[in-house]
Amino acid sequence: MKKHIKKIAALLAILILMPMGTALAIDTEVIDERWGKPVYVYGGGLSESEVQQTGKLLGITNYDNVNAMSVTGEDEIKYLGSGEGVTGDMISSVLVKKRGENYGVNVTIETPDKITQITADQYRNASITAGVTNADIIIASVKPVTGESALTGVYKAFDTSGEALNTVRMQVAQKELETTNDIAQENKDKSGFNINNLNQVIINVKQELGKVNTETGEVASLDEIRQFIEEAIVKYDLKEVVTSEQVNRLVQLFEEYQTSGAVNDAEVKEQLGILASQVKDKATQIYEDAKESGLLDKILSGIASFFQWVSSLIGS
């Protein structure tokens, strides 16, 4: 029993220390002479007062230094090739700032209580698939939404800034977001499921597919795709959680990912490398900081004591 308690305590401590994302701030008091104004794309379903409220949530302090525009149902159809195209349903909003080379794609969700399903790393992953590079993206909503349409605003921000993204890749990115979100929602109540691990699986498989393309000049076969997925699921402790039917959906997703052109894009490979390093470094740094400060030992001790207490109650 003591051995099991220690294992459970260690696992819970790691989950407690797991990073939730890096907070971003985009300065709107000055104009970046190299990269220009950041772009504020607000949901077309918002009232004027809600547009102002959302801007405040995103940290906008001077609208003279921001390019502001709405995102509509027509934009959803244009960029995603799907959706019902209802402007009144467009609620989530974004503030996007282009950055320099080797920066990566960073995302902060300012209203996690309102963006109810999609995580920052899911947005980062899908944005990279679509071709977004080196940018800060802040997302917010004044009303509860799933968050699946926020990428439409990101794509419009890039398009209106003269960096049009590939339509096929944007559509695959949206399918990626929807597929990973569906799998996350289906597994959220299962013991052992962790959305961060699922995000790591997606990054890992993309990188493996990129390696195949680099080494052979070809795309991976369906059997290879399945193998990469299954190996990543084992690596990130989701073997007992993700079902065979969900694996089939991931195989289909990555087959489309390969044919979209993302797999042989040098910038995608670079951005994925930065993302993988950042995710790993954040987790490692927080763990090491907690260990060095003694916080980890305190968490382990407290959790272990709790389970010892529960065990004593059961045994009495």
Image (cartoon, rainbow, N blue to C red):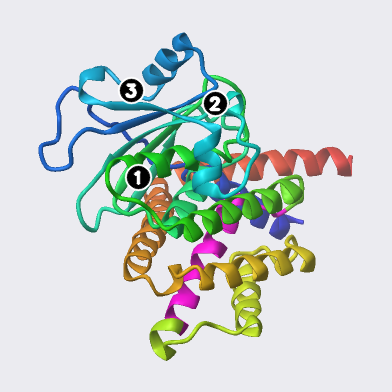
Q: What residue did someone put label 1 on?
A: 159
Q: Which residue is pictured at 40% across the width and 13% down the height?
A: 52
Q: Is residue 211 above or below residue 297?
A: below
Query: Looking at the picture, which amino acid does disc 3 mark?
Result: Gly
Please give the residue where the numbered disc 2 appears in the rendered image. Answer: 91
Amino acid type of the residue tagged 1 in the rendering: Asp
Whether residue 229 appears in this view of the structure is yes
- The residues colored magenta run 192-212
Of callouts 3 and 2, the N-terminal one: 3
Q: How far apart are marks 2 and 1 (CA)?
A: 20 Å
State whether residue 216 is above or below residue 260.
below
Disc 3 marks which residue? 59
Horizontal and vertical percent for residue 201?
A: 56, 64
**Residue 183 image offset from top left, x and y in percent:** 70, 53
Instruction: Compare marks 2 and 1 and give the one earlier in the sequence.
Output: 2
Q: In this view, does 298 lie to the left or right of 55?
A: right
Q: How far apart are marks 1 and 3 (CA)?
A: 22 Å
Residue 66 spot, x, y in % from top left: 26, 26
Question: Are the residues tagged 3 and 2 within 8 Å (C-beta)?
Answer: no
Q: How busy is the neighbourhood of tag 2: few (under 14 within 10 Å), some, or many (20 plus)?
A: many
Is-magenta flag for residue 209? yes
Q: Nearer the viewer, residue 145 or 157?
A: 157
